[in-house]
Image (cartoon, rainbow, N blue to C red):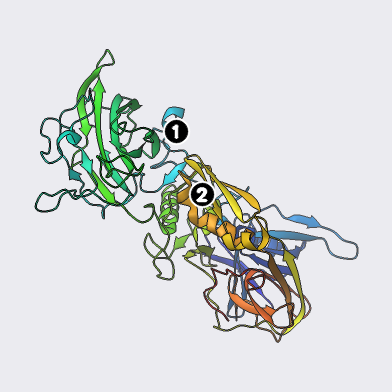
């Protein structure tokens, strides 16, 4: 059956007509969704078809009842004249994933929180570029965090803590409270501070009152036990790494300018153990003290406007992983904000902060950022490294799954083929140096190193806070680079299972192996060309093999088919 190409309005909602003279039709679907495309040619004399194919209009392809995807007209078509043939116009249509933008294709981009107003200057812009997502951002949901424990103030110390409740010398605010992440005494008042090392997180939002407007300069005093970093509106503002005994209460003082939005103070404290025993660098229960003051006309501290108290802050006590946000959180925010500006009018989505499009809970949280102006499509591609797959259906629905590619038929073996070829790829690196603005670390695939020796590669993350927040992308990177791979290309016969009917992009299927048997691989590309004379289709399928002999750790395989 010949493919049907129907043209719709730019939002994909209104059918405008069907192409009647399209030929040389080719569909190319790739796992790199932004690279997928549809090409075809119409004769120059096909005025009705040419009139339909205006820029940004959507072309949906069907084969009877089978949906082959949606695309949109992008580049100006090329006029082709060959000897003995009528002049034709060749069209290249991009996949609907490119609605989100990517490369030189416009769509939607990453904006600052709440838009541009009030953020035009370089000084203020530094708060918003890159646009960060994670526990230290204003849009993070801390509803599940707990109220921290207070260990008293200088004017009213906790008698059980004695000197530890005293503020450092010269502290300007006797009413600021030492906030602790966990209760350090049992019900009888006995010392229970010998906790294991860990990391505590604190968040407090200050909405400036009368007399403190956007542009006002305020002074911040902060200290904590033991190693810590303070973020102000998501930007690292002060940090301390304990180097000698007794410096754990050293005050840090700095000035900041109040912006147009409420101020978020977020602090990460590495602690654990007894605060009076500084043998181990990890000793000390996570705790901190902070005061914010206005300045008088002589630039001297004037009035306390915010400080640490159990009513101003919440905390997260020693989580196992860095608290962050989900893939769904990031994409939902970016799409919602874009649509509020009028972009992406034809797009909808079927996921949320908690569940993917299949109703599966997100298993990974991330703390990461993207530069302002980055396209949402490029962000979506980056997010696949955190463990997700995405695509846009022909009806304009953005589907994001913790793992896409559930085999449509349950069991598919591509054993009836006209041609099959295998091409190997060597390992690229099994020891990755991870470089971030917040530090350097390395990750090693021990099994690969034992087999092949140490082969180093680099992974730079310029918009993440520290190496441990990108563990998933680094693991994904090593999963691809630490082992030789055996990719396959299969030319299907009409008797073989067919794309979009029996299997789809990213499905796991079986196909011929080097030893004459079969191996399991994931469908990475579907390329189909329709024969103009009889409507038959030549399908070429590219597969990424996961073979036990070349990659013994196929961690992403969820089904063997």
* Residue beneath disc 1: 126
Q: Residue furthest top?
A: 298
Asked which secondary structure carries label 1, the reply is loop
> Quick one: which residue is furthest to the front in this view?
279
- Residue at 24% across / 26% down in the picture? 293
Q: Give residue 349's quadrant in the image.
A: bottom left
Q: Residue at x 58, y 80 (%)?
A: 65
Q: Is residue 464 left or right of residue 137?
A: right
467 or 119: nearer the viewer: 467
Gap between marks 2 and 1 measured at Cα: 21 Å
Look at discs 2 and 1 and give the one toward the viewer.
Answer: 1
> For this rendering, which residue is in front, 501 or 435?
435
Residue 332, located in which quarter of the rendered image?
Answer: bottom left
Picture residue at 41% right of the left edge, 35% below the top: 127
In the structure shown, which secondary structural element does the residue marked by tag 2 occupy? loop
Residue 468's place in the image compared with 512, above or below, is above
Quick one: label 2, few (<14), some, or many (20+) residues within 10 Å? Answer: many
| Sequence-wise first label, 2 or 1 | 2
Q: Can you identify the residue that label 2 sits on? A: 108
| The N terminus lies in quadrant | bottom right
The x and y percentages for residue 518 are 68, 81
Quadrant (top left/top right/bottom left/bottom right) for the C terminus:
bottom right
Tell me: residue 279, above or below residue 15. Answer: above
Residue 373 spot, x, y in % from top left: 52, 42
Q: Nearer the viewer, residue 49 or 321?
A: 321
> Where does residue 550 sit, x and y in percent of width and height?
67, 69
Callout 1: 10 Å neighbours few (<14), some, many (20+)?
few
């Amino acid at each position: 059956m010949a493919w049907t190409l129907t043209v719709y309005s730019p939002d994909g909602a209104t059918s405008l007509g069907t192409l009647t003279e399209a030929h040389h039709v080719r569909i190319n679907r790739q796992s790199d969704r932004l690279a997928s495309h549809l090409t075809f040619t119409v004769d120059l004399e096909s005025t009705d078809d040419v009139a339909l194919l205006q820029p940004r209009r959507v072309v949906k392809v069907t084969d009877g009842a089978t949906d082959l995807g949606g695309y949109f007209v992008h580049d100006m078509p090329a006029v082709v004249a060959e000897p003995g043939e009528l002049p034709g116009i060749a069209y290249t249509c991009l996949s609907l994933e490119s609605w989100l933008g990517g490369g030189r294709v416009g769509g939607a981009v990453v904006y600052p929180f709440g838009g541009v107003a009030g953020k035009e200057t370089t000084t203020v812009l530094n708060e918003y570029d890159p646009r960060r997502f994670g526990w230290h951002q204003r849009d993070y949901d801390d509803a599940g965090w707990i109220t921290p424990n207070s260990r008293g103030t200088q004017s009213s110390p906790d008698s059980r803590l004695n000197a530890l409740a005293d503020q450092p010398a010269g502290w300007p605010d006797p009413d600021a409270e030492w906030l602790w992440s966990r209760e350090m005494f049992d019900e009888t008042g006995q010392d229970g501070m010998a906790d294991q090392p860990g990391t505590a997180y604190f968040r407090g939002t200050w909405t400036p009152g009368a007399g403190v407007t956007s542009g006002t300069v305020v002074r911040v005093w902060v200290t904590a036990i033991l190693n810590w970093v303070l973020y102000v509106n998501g930007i690292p503002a002060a940090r301390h790494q304990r180097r000698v005994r007794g410096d754990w209460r050293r005050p840090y003082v700095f000035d900041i300018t109040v912006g147009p939005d409420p101020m978020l103070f977020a602090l990460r404290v590495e602690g654990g153990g007894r605060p009076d025993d500084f043998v181990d660098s990890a000793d000390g229960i996570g705790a901190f003290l902070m005061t914010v003051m206005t300045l008088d006309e002589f630039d001297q501290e004037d009035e306390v406007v915010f400080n640490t108290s159990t009513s101003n802050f919440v905390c997260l006590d020693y989580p196992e992983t860095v608290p962050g946000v989900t893939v769904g959180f990031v994409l939902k925010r970016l799409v919602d904000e874009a649509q509020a500006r009028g972009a992406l009018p034809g797009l909808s989505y079927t996921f949320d902060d908690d569940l993917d499009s299949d109703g599966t809970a997100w298993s990974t949280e991330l703390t990461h950022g993207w530069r302002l102006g980055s396209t949402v499509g490029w962000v979506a591609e980056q997010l696949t490294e955190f463990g997700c797959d995405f695509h846009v259906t022909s009806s304009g629905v953005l589907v994001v799954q913790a793992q896409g590619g559930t085999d449509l038929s349950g069991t598919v073996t591509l054993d009836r083929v006209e041609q099959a070829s295998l091409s190997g790829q060597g390992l690229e690196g099994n020891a990755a140096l991870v470089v971030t603005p917040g530090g350097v670390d390395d990750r090693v695939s021990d099994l690969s190193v034992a087999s092949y020796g140490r082969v180093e590669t680099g992974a730079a993350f310029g918009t993440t806070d520290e190496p441990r927040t990108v563990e998933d992308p680094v693991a994904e990177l090593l999963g691809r680079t630490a082992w030789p791979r055996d990719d396959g290309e299969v030319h299907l016969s009409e008797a073989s299972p067919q794309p979009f009917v029996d299997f789809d992009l990213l499905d796991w299927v079986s196909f011929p192996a080097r030893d004459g048997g079969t191996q399991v691989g994931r469908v990475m590309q579907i390329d189909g060309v329709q024969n103009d004379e009889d409507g038959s289709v030549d399908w070429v399928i590219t597969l990424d093999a996961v073979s036990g002999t070349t990659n013994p750790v196929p961690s992403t395989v969820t089904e063997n088919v």
